[in-house]
Image: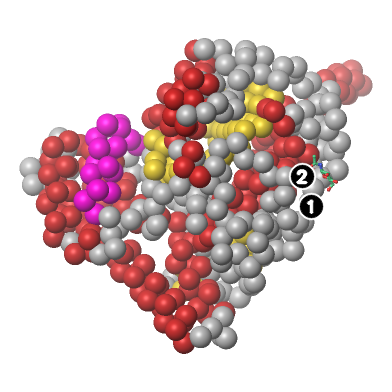
Amino acid sequence: MALRHGVLYLVLLAVVLVVRVESGKNWVLIVAGAKDYNNYFSQADSCHAYHTMLNNSIPPENIIHMSYDDVAHDPQNPFQGNLINVPGGPNLYPGCKMDYRKEEVTPEVFLKVLTGDKEGVKKLIGRDGKVVDSGPDDHVFVTMVDHGGPGVFCFPGFVELHNTDLNNALKQMHRENRYKEMVLYVESCYSGSMFEGILPKNINIYSTTCSNAHESGYMCCWDKTREVYLGTQYGNAWMYDTDKANLHKETLYQQYEVVKKACNVSGTVSHPMQYGNLSMNKEVLAQYQSKAEGYQPGVCLNTLEADNTLGPEFTFAGIDLNNPAIDMVQIATTARRLIESRDLSGEKQEKLKADLRHMMLVKEKAESLTKDLVKAALSSPRGLTETDILTGKEQVSNSECYKTALGLFSARCPGINMGKYPFARRNLQAFINLCNHQPQTDVMNAIMEVTEKYGICRAL
Ligand SMILES: *[C@@H]1O[C@H](CO)[C@@H](O)[C@H](O)[C@H]1NC(C)=O
Ligand SMILES: *[C@@H]1O[C@H](CO)[C@@H](O)[C@H](O)[C@H]1NC(C)=O
Ligand SMILES: *[C@@H]1O[C@H](CO)[C@@H](O)[C@H](O)[C@H]1NC(C)=O
Protein backbone atom coordinates (compact mmCIF):
# COMPACT_ATOMS: atom_id res chain seq x y z
CA MET A 1 0.00 0.00 0.00
CA ALA A 2 2.72 2.43 1.07
CA LEU A 3 4.71 1.46 -2.01
CA ARG A 4 1.77 2.08 -4.33
CA HIS A 5 1.26 5.50 -2.77
CA GLY A 6 4.94 6.20 -3.19
CA VAL A 7 4.84 5.27 -6.87
CA LEU A 8 1.72 7.36 -7.42
CA TYR A 9 3.44 10.25 -5.70
CA LEU A 10 6.50 9.93 -7.94
CA VAL A 11 4.30 9.81 -11.05
CA LEU A 12 2.45 12.94 -9.93
CA LEU A 13 5.71 14.66 -9.12
CA ALA A 14 7.06 13.81 -12.57
CA VAL A 15 3.95 15.28 -14.19
CA VAL A 16 4.34 18.47 -12.20
CA LEU A 17 8.01 18.76 -13.05
CA VAL A 18 7.54 18.36 -16.80
CA VAL A 19 7.54 21.94 -17.82
CA ARG A 20 5.12 22.70 -20.56
CA VAL A 21 5.65 26.08 -22.07
CA GLU A 22 2.82 26.64 -24.49
CA SER A 23 3.41 27.67 -28.05
CA GLY A 24 2.28 30.95 -29.51
CA LYS A 25 4.18 34.19 -29.48
CA ASN A 26 5.54 36.14 -26.53
CA TRP A 27 5.00 39.86 -26.25
CA VAL A 28 6.62 42.13 -23.71
CA LEU A 29 5.63 45.73 -22.99
CA ILE A 30 7.99 47.71 -20.73
CA VAL A 31 7.10 51.15 -19.38
CA ALA A 32 9.24 53.67 -17.50
CA GLY A 33 6.76 56.28 -16.39
CA ALA A 34 9.12 58.91 -14.99
CA LYS A 35 11.36 61.67 -16.28
CA ASP A 36 13.98 63.85 -14.52
CA TYR A 37 17.36 62.86 -13.14
CA ASN A 38 16.08 62.37 -9.57
CA ASN A 39 13.80 59.63 -10.92
CA TYR A 40 16.81 57.71 -12.28
CA PHE A 41 15.38 54.41 -10.95
CA SER A 42 12.50 54.28 -13.39
CA GLN A 43 14.54 54.37 -16.60
CA ALA A 44 17.29 52.20 -15.08
CA ASP A 45 14.69 49.56 -14.17
CA SER A 46 13.14 49.65 -17.63
CA CYS A 47 16.48 49.28 -19.44
CA HIS A 48 17.32 46.40 -17.14
CA ALA A 49 13.99 44.74 -18.02
CA TYR A 50 14.68 45.34 -21.73
CA HIS A 51 18.08 43.64 -21.59
CA THR A 52 16.79 40.80 -19.47
CA MET A 53 13.99 40.04 -21.95
CA LEU A 54 16.34 40.28 -24.92
CA ASN A 55 18.82 38.08 -23.15
CA ASN A 56 16.06 35.54 -22.50
CA SER A 57 15.50 35.29 -26.26
CA ILE A 58 12.25 37.21 -26.52
CA PRO A 59 12.44 38.33 -30.18
CA PRO A 60 13.34 42.04 -30.26
CA GLU A 61 10.40 42.75 -32.59
CA ASN A 62 8.07 41.54 -29.84
CA ILE A 63 9.50 43.79 -27.12
CA ILE A 64 8.04 47.27 -26.87
CA HIS A 65 9.71 49.82 -24.62
CA MET A 66 8.38 53.22 -23.59
CA SER A 67 10.76 55.56 -21.74
CA TYR A 68 11.16 59.34 -21.64
CA ASP A 69 14.93 58.76 -22.03
CA ASP A 70 16.29 61.94 -20.45
CA VAL A 71 18.35 60.43 -17.62
CA ALA A 72 21.34 58.85 -19.38
CA HIS A 73 22.23 62.19 -20.98
CA ASP A 74 21.04 64.53 -18.24
CA PRO A 75 23.77 67.13 -17.52
CA GLN A 76 23.65 66.03 -13.85
CA ASN A 77 24.65 62.48 -14.81
CA PRO A 78 28.44 62.32 -14.22
CA PHE A 79 28.64 59.32 -16.58
CA GLN A 80 27.02 60.44 -19.81
CA GLY A 81 25.26 57.70 -21.75
CA ASN A 82 25.40 55.42 -18.75
CA LEU A 83 22.57 53.87 -16.73
CA ILE A 84 23.11 51.30 -14.00
CA ASN A 85 20.57 49.60 -11.76
CA VAL A 86 22.77 48.70 -8.80
CA PRO A 87 26.08 50.18 -7.58
CA GLY A 88 28.90 48.58 -9.59
CA GLY A 89 26.46 47.07 -12.09
CA PRO A 90 26.90 47.04 -15.88
CA ASN A 91 25.93 49.95 -18.11
CA LEU A 92 22.41 49.13 -19.30
CA TYR A 93 22.03 52.06 -21.68
CA PRO A 94 23.87 50.78 -24.77
CA GLY A 95 21.51 48.60 -26.76
CA CYS A 96 18.52 49.63 -24.69
CA LYS A 97 16.16 50.33 -27.55
CA MET A 98 13.13 52.53 -27.00
CA ASP A 99 10.11 52.52 -29.25
CA TYR A 100 8.41 55.53 -27.70
CA ARG A 101 10.39 58.41 -26.18
CA LYS A 102 9.86 61.90 -24.75
CA GLU A 103 6.35 63.32 -25.36
CA GLU A 104 5.18 60.04 -26.88
CA VAL A 105 5.21 58.39 -23.45
CA THR A 106 1.60 59.01 -22.40
CA PRO A 107 -1.25 56.92 -20.99
CA GLU A 108 -3.18 57.31 -24.28
CA VAL A 109 -0.31 55.94 -26.40
CA PHE A 110 0.29 53.19 -23.83
CA LEU A 111 -3.35 52.03 -24.01
CA LYS A 112 -3.30 51.98 -27.84
CA VAL A 113 0.01 50.07 -27.85
CA LEU A 114 -1.32 47.55 -25.33
CA THR A 115 -4.57 46.94 -27.20
CA GLY A 116 -2.76 46.59 -30.54
CA ASP A 117 -4.38 49.66 -32.07
CA LYS A 118 -1.88 50.70 -34.78
CA GLU A 119 -4.23 53.26 -36.28
CA GLY A 120 -4.87 54.79 -32.87
CA VAL A 121 -1.13 55.12 -32.23
CA LYS A 122 -0.61 56.79 -35.60
CA LYS A 123 -3.41 59.25 -34.90
CA LEU A 124 -1.83 60.20 -31.60
CA ILE A 125 1.82 60.56 -32.60
CA GLY A 126 1.69 61.07 -36.35
CA ARG A 127 3.84 58.08 -37.23
CA ASP A 128 3.66 54.30 -37.26
CA GLY A 129 4.63 52.70 -33.98
CA LYS A 130 5.09 49.19 -32.68
CA VAL A 131 2.11 47.71 -30.84
CA VAL A 132 1.31 44.47 -28.98
CA ASP A 133 0.07 42.77 -32.13
CA SER A 134 -0.95 39.63 -30.31
CA GLY A 135 -3.40 36.84 -31.07
CA PRO A 136 -5.41 34.18 -29.19
CA ASP A 137 -2.44 31.83 -28.61
CA ASP A 138 -0.04 34.48 -27.35
CA HIS A 139 1.36 35.29 -23.94
CA VAL A 140 1.75 38.92 -22.94
CA PHE A 141 3.98 40.28 -20.18
CA VAL A 142 3.70 43.91 -19.10
CA THR A 143 6.03 45.58 -16.62
CA MET A 144 5.71 49.21 -15.58
CA VAL A 145 7.57 51.31 -13.04
CA ASP A 146 7.06 54.86 -11.81
CA HIS A 147 5.32 56.98 -9.22
CA GLY A 148 1.66 56.42 -8.58
CA GLY A 149 -1.16 57.50 -6.37
CA PRO A 150 -4.43 56.04 -5.17
CA GLY A 151 -6.16 54.69 -8.31
CA VAL A 152 -3.51 56.05 -10.69
CA PHE A 153 -0.17 55.14 -12.27
CA CYS A 154 1.70 58.17 -13.56
CA PHE A 155 3.37 58.93 -16.86
CA PRO A 156 5.96 61.72 -17.28
CA GLY A 157 4.75 64.80 -15.43
CA PHE A 158 1.54 64.28 -13.54
CA VAL A 159 -0.29 62.56 -16.36
CA GLU A 160 -2.30 59.76 -14.88
CA LEU A 161 -3.31 56.37 -16.15
CA HIS A 162 -6.49 55.67 -14.19
CA ASN A 163 -7.20 52.18 -12.90
CA THR A 164 -10.58 52.17 -14.65
CA ASP A 165 -9.01 52.86 -18.06
CA LEU A 166 -6.31 50.22 -17.61
CA ASN A 167 -8.84 47.56 -16.61
CA ASN A 168 -11.24 48.50 -19.41
CA ALA A 169 -8.37 48.02 -21.87
CA LEU A 170 -7.58 44.61 -20.37
CA LYS A 171 -11.22 43.53 -20.62
CA GLN A 172 -11.36 44.76 -24.20
CA MET A 173 -8.28 42.68 -25.06
CA HIS A 174 -9.96 39.65 -23.54
CA ARG A 175 -13.16 40.21 -25.55
CA GLU A 176 -11.11 40.64 -28.71
CA ASN A 177 -9.14 37.43 -28.05
CA ARG A 178 -5.87 39.27 -28.04
CA TYR A 179 -4.04 36.90 -25.73
CA LYS A 180 -4.12 33.47 -24.21
CA GLU A 181 -2.79 34.63 -20.88
CA MET A 182 -1.32 37.88 -19.62
CA VAL A 183 0.86 38.84 -16.65
CA LEU A 184 1.44 42.37 -15.37
CA TYR A 185 4.05 43.52 -12.85
CA VAL A 186 3.27 47.03 -11.62
CA GLU A 187 5.60 49.03 -9.42
CA SER A 188 4.52 52.38 -7.99
CA CYS A 189 3.23 53.69 -4.71
CA TYR A 190 -0.37 52.52 -4.23
CA SER A 191 0.10 50.06 -7.11
CA GLY A 192 -2.38 47.61 -5.56
CA SER A 193 -5.08 50.19 -6.24
CA MET A 194 -4.62 49.66 -9.98
CA PHE A 195 -6.25 46.22 -9.62
CA GLU A 196 -7.91 45.77 -6.23
CA GLY A 197 -11.60 45.11 -6.67
CA ILE A 198 -11.46 45.84 -10.42
CA LEU A 199 -9.33 43.24 -12.19
CA PRO A 200 -11.66 40.32 -13.03
CA LYS A 201 -10.51 36.85 -11.92
CA ASN A 202 -11.82 35.15 -15.05
CA ILE A 203 -10.02 36.83 -17.96
CA ASN A 204 -6.72 34.90 -17.73
CA ILE A 205 -4.76 37.77 -16.30
CA TYR A 206 -2.47 37.58 -13.29
CA SER A 207 -0.76 40.57 -11.75
CA THR A 208 1.60 41.38 -8.94
CA THR A 209 2.23 44.85 -7.52
CA CYS A 210 4.98 46.20 -5.28
CA SER A 211 2.56 47.43 -2.65
CA ASN A 212 -1.02 47.09 -1.55
CA ALA A 213 -3.62 49.71 -2.44
CA HIS A 214 -2.81 51.99 0.48
CA GLU A 215 0.96 52.21 0.84
CA SER A 216 4.21 53.25 -0.80
CA GLY A 217 6.74 51.11 -2.56
CA TYR A 218 10.41 51.60 -1.65
CA MET A 219 13.67 52.54 -3.30
CA CYS A 220 17.08 50.94 -2.99
CA CYS A 221 20.64 51.37 -4.09
CA TRP A 222 21.90 54.88 -3.35
CA ASP A 223 24.91 55.69 -5.51
CA LYS A 224 27.32 58.15 -3.94
CA THR A 225 28.91 59.31 -7.18
CA ARG A 226 25.72 59.65 -9.20
CA GLU A 227 23.85 61.01 -6.16
CA VAL A 228 20.63 59.16 -6.96
CA TYR A 229 18.79 55.99 -5.98
CA LEU A 230 19.50 53.54 -8.80
CA GLY A 231 16.69 51.09 -8.27
CA THR A 232 13.71 49.83 -6.34
CA GLN A 233 13.19 46.95 -3.95
CA TYR A 234 10.53 45.17 -5.99
CA GLY A 235 11.93 45.87 -9.47
CA ASN A 236 15.49 44.95 -8.62
CA ALA A 237 14.33 41.85 -6.76
CA TRP A 238 12.33 40.33 -9.62
CA MET A 239 14.81 41.23 -12.33
CA TYR A 240 17.90 39.93 -10.56
CA ASP A 241 15.90 36.85 -9.67
CA THR A 242 14.93 36.35 -13.30
CA ASP A 243 18.54 36.94 -14.37
CA LYS A 244 19.81 34.08 -12.27
CA ALA A 245 16.88 31.68 -12.01
CA ASN A 246 16.11 28.71 -14.21
CA LEU A 247 12.94 30.10 -15.77
CA HIS A 248 11.79 26.64 -16.81
CA LYS A 249 11.61 25.62 -13.15
CA GLU A 250 10.73 28.71 -11.17
CA THR A 251 7.06 29.69 -11.01
CA LEU A 252 5.38 33.09 -10.92
CA TYR A 253 4.42 32.33 -7.34
CA GLN A 254 8.01 31.61 -6.37
CA GLN A 255 9.05 34.93 -7.85
CA TYR A 256 6.26 36.62 -5.90
CA GLU A 257 7.74 35.11 -2.73
CA VAL A 258 11.15 36.50 -3.71
CA VAL A 259 9.82 40.05 -4.09
CA LYS A 260 7.80 39.77 -0.87
CA LYS A 261 10.96 38.95 1.00
CA ALA A 262 12.95 41.74 -0.67
CA CYS A 263 10.28 44.29 0.26
CA ASN A 264 10.32 43.27 3.90
CA VAL A 265 13.39 44.97 5.32
CA SER A 266 12.96 46.45 8.75
CA GLY A 267 11.47 49.89 8.85
CA THR A 268 10.38 50.01 5.23
CA VAL A 269 7.90 47.25 4.63
CA SER A 270 5.62 47.22 1.63
CA HIS A 271 3.30 44.35 0.86
CA PRO A 272 3.54 43.03 -2.70
CA MET A 273 0.15 41.71 -3.79
CA GLN A 274 -1.30 39.30 -6.34
CA TYR A 275 -4.49 39.97 -8.32
CA GLY A 276 -6.59 38.35 -11.03
CA ASN A 277 -6.51 34.61 -11.71
CA LEU A 278 -4.25 33.34 -8.94
CA SER A 279 -4.19 29.79 -10.37
CA MET A 280 -1.93 31.14 -13.08
CA ASN A 281 0.85 31.66 -10.56
CA LYS A 282 1.71 27.94 -10.83
CA GLU A 283 3.05 28.57 -14.32
CA VAL A 284 6.78 28.83 -14.89
CA LEU A 285 8.43 32.18 -15.58
CA ALA A 286 9.62 30.91 -18.97
CA GLN A 287 6.03 31.19 -20.21
CA TYR A 288 6.23 34.99 -20.02
CA GLN A 289 9.80 36.12 -19.53
CA SER A 290 11.66 34.02 -22.08
CA LYS A 291 11.22 32.19 -25.29
CA ALA A 292 11.70 28.44 -25.00
CA GLU A 293 14.10 28.27 -27.93
CA GLY A 294 17.46 29.87 -27.33
CA TYR A 295 17.03 30.57 -23.66
CA GLN A 296 19.85 29.27 -21.50
CA PRO A 297 19.38 29.36 -17.76
CA GLY A 298 22.22 31.05 -15.96
CA VAL A 299 23.58 32.91 -18.97
CA CYS A 300 22.63 36.35 -17.90
CA LEU A 301 23.62 39.92 -18.07
CA ASN A 302 24.30 40.43 -14.44
CA THR A 303 23.74 38.55 -11.24
CA LEU A 304 24.84 41.26 -8.88
CA GLU A 305 22.04 41.62 -6.41
CA ALA A 306 20.76 44.75 -4.77
CA ASP A 307 22.10 45.14 -1.28
CA ASN A 308 19.02 45.61 0.82
CA THR A 309 20.81 45.14 4.10
CA LEU A 310 20.44 48.24 6.14
CA GLY A 311 23.35 50.20 7.42
CA PRO A 312 22.91 52.22 10.58
CA GLU A 313 19.62 54.05 10.78
CA PHE A 314 19.78 57.11 8.59
CA THR A 315 16.79 59.40 8.44
CA PHE A 316 15.72 62.91 7.60
CA ALA A 317 12.39 64.24 8.92
CA GLY A 318 11.30 60.66 9.56
CA ILE A 319 12.16 59.55 6.01
CA ASP A 320 14.44 56.52 5.76
CA LEU A 321 17.37 57.59 3.60
CA ASN A 322 18.54 54.02 2.98
CA ASN A 323 15.25 52.84 1.50
CA PRO A 324 12.94 55.84 1.12
CA ALA A 325 9.39 55.49 -0.10
CA ILE A 326 9.28 55.94 -3.88
CA ASP A 327 7.17 59.09 -3.56
CA MET A 328 9.72 60.59 -1.14
CA VAL A 329 12.57 60.17 -3.63
CA GLN A 330 13.02 63.91 -4.30
CA ILE A 331 13.17 64.83 -0.62
CA ALA A 332 15.43 61.89 0.24
CA THR A 333 17.77 62.57 -2.69
CA THR A 334 18.12 66.25 -1.82
CA ALA A 335 18.67 65.50 1.87
CA ARG A 336 21.34 62.91 1.09
CA ARG A 337 23.15 65.20 -1.33
CA LEU A 338 23.26 67.85 1.35
CA ILE A 339 24.40 65.50 4.09
CA GLU A 340 27.01 63.61 2.07
CA SER A 341 28.54 66.27 -0.13
CA ARG A 342 30.80 68.05 2.31
CA ASP A 343 32.86 69.69 -0.42
CA LEU A 344 29.88 71.50 -1.95
CA SER A 345 30.23 75.25 -2.38
CA GLY A 346 28.26 77.43 0.02
CA GLU A 347 26.03 78.47 -2.85
CA LYS A 348 25.17 74.90 -3.80
CA GLN A 349 24.45 74.05 -0.18
CA GLU A 350 22.10 77.01 0.11
CA LYS A 351 20.30 75.90 -3.05
CA LEU A 352 19.81 72.36 -1.71
CA LYS A 353 18.60 73.72 1.63
CA ALA A 354 16.14 76.03 -0.11
CA ASP A 355 14.84 73.15 -2.28
CA LEU A 356 14.41 70.99 0.78
CA ARG A 357 12.58 73.73 2.71
CA HIS A 358 10.28 74.31 -0.24
CA MET A 359 9.45 70.60 -0.59
CA MET A 360 8.72 70.28 3.13
CA LEU A 361 6.46 73.33 2.86
CA VAL A 362 4.60 71.86 -0.14
CA LYS A 363 4.15 68.62 1.80
CA GLU A 364 2.73 70.41 4.81
CA LYS A 365 0.48 72.73 2.77
CA ALA A 366 -0.85 69.86 0.65
CA GLU A 367 -1.93 68.14 3.87
CA SER A 368 -3.63 71.17 5.41
CA LEU A 369 -5.21 72.12 2.09
CA THR A 370 -6.72 68.64 1.83
CA LYS A 371 -8.23 68.99 5.31
CA ASP A 372 -9.77 72.34 4.40
CA LEU A 373 -10.98 70.92 1.12
CA VAL A 374 -12.78 68.09 2.86
CA LYS A 375 -14.36 70.51 5.30
CA ALA A 376 -15.57 72.74 2.47
CA ALA A 377 -16.92 69.83 0.43
CA LEU A 378 -18.85 68.52 3.42
CA SER A 379 -20.77 71.72 4.07
CA SER A 380 -23.84 69.56 3.47
CA PRO A 381 -22.57 66.19 4.66
CA ARG A 382 -24.19 62.99 3.39
CA GLY A 383 -23.77 60.91 6.48
CA LEU A 384 -19.96 60.89 6.62
CA THR A 385 -17.73 62.95 8.88
CA GLU A 386 -14.51 64.74 7.95
CA THR A 387 -12.55 62.04 9.73
CA ASP A 388 -14.30 59.33 7.68
CA ILE A 389 -13.27 61.08 4.48
CA LEU A 390 -9.72 61.82 5.63
CA THR A 391 -9.00 58.32 6.92
CA GLY A 392 -11.24 56.10 4.74
CA LYS A 393 -9.55 53.74 2.30
CA GLU A 394 -12.19 53.40 -0.37
CA GLN A 395 -11.79 52.21 -3.94
CA VAL A 396 -12.52 54.54 -6.82
CA SER A 397 -16.23 54.19 -7.59
CA ASN A 398 -16.84 57.55 -9.24
CA SER A 399 -13.95 57.62 -11.68
CA GLU A 400 -15.42 60.51 -13.69
CA CYS A 401 -15.56 62.76 -10.63
CA TYR A 402 -12.04 61.74 -9.54
CA LYS A 403 -10.57 62.50 -12.97
CA THR A 404 -12.33 65.87 -13.14
CA ALA A 405 -11.24 66.75 -9.61
CA LEU A 406 -7.57 65.94 -10.37
CA GLY A 407 -7.72 68.00 -13.55
CA LEU A 408 -9.27 70.96 -11.80
CA PHE A 409 -6.89 70.74 -8.85
CA SER A 410 -3.80 70.63 -11.09
CA ALA A 411 -5.05 73.64 -13.06
CA ARG A 412 -5.97 75.65 -9.95
CA CYS A 413 -2.93 74.76 -7.87
CA PRO A 414 0.19 74.49 -10.06
CA GLY A 415 2.30 75.24 -6.95
CA ILE A 416 1.46 71.82 -5.52
CA ASN A 417 2.74 70.18 -8.67
CA MET A 418 2.01 66.49 -8.24
CA GLY A 419 4.28 65.65 -11.16
CA LYS A 420 7.25 67.24 -9.45
CA TYR A 421 6.20 66.43 -5.88
CA PRO A 422 4.81 62.88 -5.88
CA PHE A 423 4.56 62.91 -2.06
CA ALA A 424 1.63 65.34 -2.42
CA ARG A 425 -0.36 62.52 -4.04
CA ARG A 426 -0.68 60.84 -0.66
CA ASN A 427 -3.63 63.15 -0.07
CA LEU A 428 -5.53 61.93 -3.10
CA GLN A 429 -7.31 59.18 -1.20
CA ALA A 430 -9.48 61.94 0.30
CA PHE A 431 -10.45 63.06 -3.23
CA ILE A 432 -11.57 59.50 -4.04
CA ASN A 433 -13.60 59.27 -0.83
CA LEU A 434 -15.22 62.66 -1.42
CA CYS A 435 -16.16 61.74 -4.98
CA ASN A 436 -17.75 58.51 -3.73
CA HIS A 437 -20.08 60.34 -1.34
CA GLN A 438 -20.62 63.95 -2.27
CA PRO A 439 -22.18 65.39 -5.43
CA GLN A 440 -19.46 66.19 -7.99
CA THR A 441 -20.40 69.90 -7.97
CA ASP A 442 -19.74 70.12 -4.21
CA VAL A 443 -16.27 68.64 -4.72
CA MET A 444 -15.46 71.03 -7.58
CA ASN A 445 -16.76 74.06 -5.71
CA ALA A 446 -14.67 73.13 -2.70
CA ILE A 447 -11.55 72.85 -4.90
CA MET A 448 -12.25 76.29 -6.38
CA GLU A 449 -12.82 77.83 -2.96
CA VAL A 450 -9.87 76.32 -1.13
CA THR A 451 -7.20 76.66 -3.84
CA GLU A 452 -8.08 80.36 -3.96
CA LYS A 453 -7.07 80.72 -0.32
CA TYR A 454 -3.69 78.98 -0.48
CA GLY A 455 -0.79 81.14 -1.61
CA ILE A 456 1.30 77.99 -2.22
CA CYS A 457 -1.00 77.14 -5.13
CA ARG A 458 0.49 79.98 -7.15
CA ALA A 459 4.02 79.80 -5.69
CA LEU A 460 5.93 78.18 -8.53
C1 LIG B 1 -7.48 30.47 -14.14
O1 LIG B 1 -6.35 29.98 -14.80
C2 LIG B 1 -6.28 28.58 -14.86
C3 LIG B 1 -4.91 28.21 -15.41
O2 LIG B 1 -4.68 28.80 -16.67
C4 LIG B 1 -7.46 28.07 -15.68
O3 LIG B 1 -7.43 26.66 -15.76
C5 LIG B 1 -8.75 28.52 -15.02
O4 LIG B 1 -9.85 28.15 -15.81
C6 LIG B 1 -8.75 30.02 -14.82
N1 LIG B 1 -9.88 30.40 -13.99
C7 LIG B 1 -10.81 31.29 -14.37
C8 LIG B 1 -11.90 31.58 -13.42
O5 LIG B 1 -10.79 31.82 -15.46
C1 LIG C 1 8.81 40.24 7.51
O1 LIG C 1 9.93 39.57 8.04
C2 LIG C 1 9.79 39.25 9.41
C3 LIG C 1 11.11 38.73 9.94
O2 LIG C 1 11.86 38.09 8.98
C4 LIG C 1 8.64 38.24 9.56
O3 LIG C 1 8.47 37.89 10.91
C5 LIG C 1 7.36 38.89 9.03
O4 LIG C 1 6.30 37.97 9.06
C6 LIG C 1 7.56 39.38 7.62
N1 LIG C 1 6.40 40.16 7.21
C7 LIG C 1 5.76 39.96 6.08
C8 LIG C 1 4.60 40.87 5.82
O5 LIG C 1 6.06 39.10 5.30
C1 LIG D 1 23.14 38.14 -22.46
O1 LIG D 1 24.08 38.11 -21.41
C2 LIG D 1 25.36 37.67 -21.77
C3 LIG D 1 26.21 37.48 -20.53
O2 LIG D 1 26.39 38.67 -19.84
C4 LIG D 1 25.94 38.66 -22.74
O3 LIG D 1 27.21 38.25 -23.14
C5 LIG D 1 25.01 38.72 -23.94
O4 LIG D 1 25.46 39.70 -24.81
C6 LIG D 1 23.61 39.06 -23.53
N1 LIG D 1 22.75 38.94 -24.68
C7 LIG D 1 21.89 39.89 -25.02
C8 LIG D 1 21.06 39.57 -26.22
O5 LIG D 1 21.79 40.92 -24.40
Q: Which residues are magenta?
A: 395-413
Q: Quadrant of the N terminus?
A: top right
- Residue 387: x and y, percent? 22, 52
Element at label 1: loop
Q: Quadrant of residue 364?
A: bottom left
Q: Quadrant of the C terminus?
A: bottom left
Membership of 258 in magenta stretch = no
* Residue placed under numbered mark 1 in the picture: 303
Question: Could you classify mark 2 by the number of other residues whose Cα lies within 10 Å: few (under 14), some (14-19), or many (20 or more)?
Answer: many
Residue 390 in the figure: left or right of residue 55: left
Foreground residue among 382 and 338: 338
Question: Could you classify mark 1 by the number of other residues whose Cα lies within 10 Å: few (under 14), some (14-19), or many (20 or more)?
Answer: some
* Residue placed under numbered mark 2 in the picture: 243
Foreground residue among 122 and 91: 122
Q: Which label number is shown at residue 444? A: none
The numbered mark, 2 or 1, whose residue comes first in the sequence reads 2
Element at label 2: helix
Marks 2 and 1, Cα distance to the nearest angstrom?
A: 6 Å
Q: CB of residue at label 1: within 8 Å of ligand 3?
A: no
Main SS category, magenta section: helix
Q: Residue at x 62, y 19 (%)?
A: 134
